[in-house]
Amino acid sequence: MEAEAIPLRNPTSEVECQNVGNISKTMNCQEKTKPPLSIGQKVELVFVVFSGFVINFMVFGFAASLSVYFVKYKRAFPMHYEMVLLTIFLQTGVFSTVGMLAGMFLHKFGVRATAVSGSVLLSLGVGASCFAPNIIFLMCFFGIVSGVGSSFLFCSMNVGVASYLENSGRHLMPLVDMGGSAGGVVCPPLISYLIDFYGWRGSLLIFAAIALNSLPCGLMYSIKNRMDNNDKNSKQRQDSYGEKDIDNIYKLLSTDIEEAGKADSCYVEHNSEQLLLQSNNSHCAEETGDLARNDTSSDHCLATKPAIDDSSSLNREHSKTNDQVEDTENTTSEISPKALFLSIFSNKGFLLFVLTMTVVVSSELTLSAMTSDFFVSKGTTRSEAAQIYGIGFTGEIIAHISSTWMLYKNKTLSLLIFCTSAILSGALVTIYPSIPTMTSLSSAGSAIFLTMCEMTAHGHYQAVCILVILEFFDEKRYPFAIGFTMTVSGIFVPIFGYIFGIITQYNNNDYTVSFYLLGSLIVIFTLPTFIRFLVKREKSKRKETHQKNLEVNLKDS
């Protein structure tokens, strides 16, 4: 009895492969015709995106205000300059360092519990700091406790929002991250205003109450329920074929070799062109000599496998590359922590990106904390410096909007955006020392313009860095990947801040040398990732061109 012929779909004709960030994945291939969202789902999505915006506003708004507190703490504790440095940079360092702990907490307890814990810890750390009797107490609560809370909030928000924004909608992530830019615009001038009226202790207590508003935002979603629902439809999530096609493919895969061979003969009736390629497979090396002088004949034979072989291995074989780790197990099965860590550490492209990300983030956070004090050293008041810094943050809003547009229109690659914007940001940092002395806010036009340009470049790579990490791994590995990246980056943030603070103090509060070094480090450590990206992109283009030429030659033959 002959096996029934099973016409398989051509993935390139009926399936649109979403390539957000342009690090392609098989799991990102979705059908063009998706069922429309119901009104309830749309409302839920709006609230989730809004919650991510608010959480980013709280976390990064407070981080942007550290530069204002740095100026105040230097005057409040003039005899403990080194401890003040550690207090300021410990917050951002802990925020990143406990990222791995936050990822494990997420994996075990879910998004809601992590977000609520983070909101309480952030509010507790900031609020308790207003009662600090000494710098040690301030370091523990302002630096460590608030840093842990910020990290828990940030990680839970990213994982939660990413679970609601499917692969085709993840270009909206920069809009969610724009909440951090809005916080950078509003919070520094607001904190400076509160310090003028209530003192730095009163400003901390007020901001603690504001930060507690992030708690209901974390209660708006639960990734555990969504993953349970997704597991019920795991077949639909694994590939883009319809239910009937999946059943037919499984039937074909369950047949023995003889039945598969018979099905092959029936399948060829629907794919005469593939049959021609298969029949020419035995002598393809002789007829394609001009196109493949440097390749062996066996390579060309392997390049033209029968269509039935390619389709039958669709759900059995997944390749691993340096830039992409495919999930070879069933998505409904649990992945051990050891397997998760091994999959992260075995990805060389991701590890190189982590190195670049570590230096770039550490340098930028150090720069952000020192910017207000740098403007004060140029002749402005603390309030004017906070206003300049806040106005400059509008550049990040522009960057997030433009990044969203580029990703939505698929104009460029997320990794390309990251590298080019980081290099540009590092170059602009080296121009800061050339800013002339400012006597008032009206004479700070050059400082405002330069800050906006630097923040625009900074905002572009900040908007896409999460997408780059997200496209390296699937949803199960993503919490660990982002946690690992934040942990490595966080280790070096207080080190960078302390070293460059000492260098600045050694040069009599002159930031010239520090800014030159920070800008140079950003450029130098971004270049390896950028060069590797360009080389792999060129190789991919050549391989694609060679494959097209080979197919044309085989058709002609």
Image (spheres, rainbow, N blue to C red):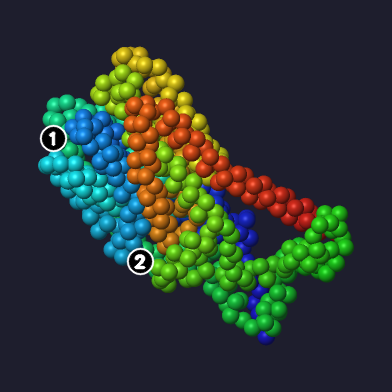
Q: Earlier in the sequence, mark 2 or mark 1?
A: 1
Characterize the local packing of mark 1: few (<14), some (14-19) or many (20 or more) Cα atoms within 10 angstroms: some
Characterize the local packing of mark 2: few (<14), some (14-19) or many (20 or more) Cα atoms within 10 angstroms: few
Query: In the image, is 367 to the left or to the right of 237?
Result: left
Residue 557 image position (x, y, % from top left) = 85, 59
Looking at the image, can residue 200 be seen? yes
Q: Which mark is residue 202?
A: 1
Query: In the image, is 509 to the left or to the right of 404?
Result: left
Rendered view: 171 above or below 393: below
**What's the residue type where badge 2 is placed?**
Asp
Rendered view: 72 above or below 241: above
Query: In the image, is 108 to the left or to the right of 362?
Result: left
For disc 2, the marked residue is 228
Residue 448 image position (x, y, % from top left) = 38, 22
Closer to the camera in the image, 37 or 414: 414
Which residue is located at x 48 percent, y 38 percent? 522
Looking at the image, can residue 44 be seen? no
* Outermost residue to the front: 506
Which residue is located at x 79 percent, y 60 percent? 295
Residue 478 image position (x, y, % from top left) = 42, 57
Closer to the camera in the image, 274 or 371: 371
Question: Which quarter of the rendering shows the N terminus?
Answer: bottom right
Residue 403 image position (x, y, % from top left) = 47, 38
Which residue is located at x 35 percent, y 14 percent? 443
**Gap between marks 2 and 1, in whole Å?**
45 Å
Q: Secondary structure at mark 2?
A: helix
* Outermost residue to the right: 286
Q: Secondary structure at mark 1?
A: helix
Give the foreground label among 2 and 1: 1
**What's the residue type where badge 1 is placed?**
Gly
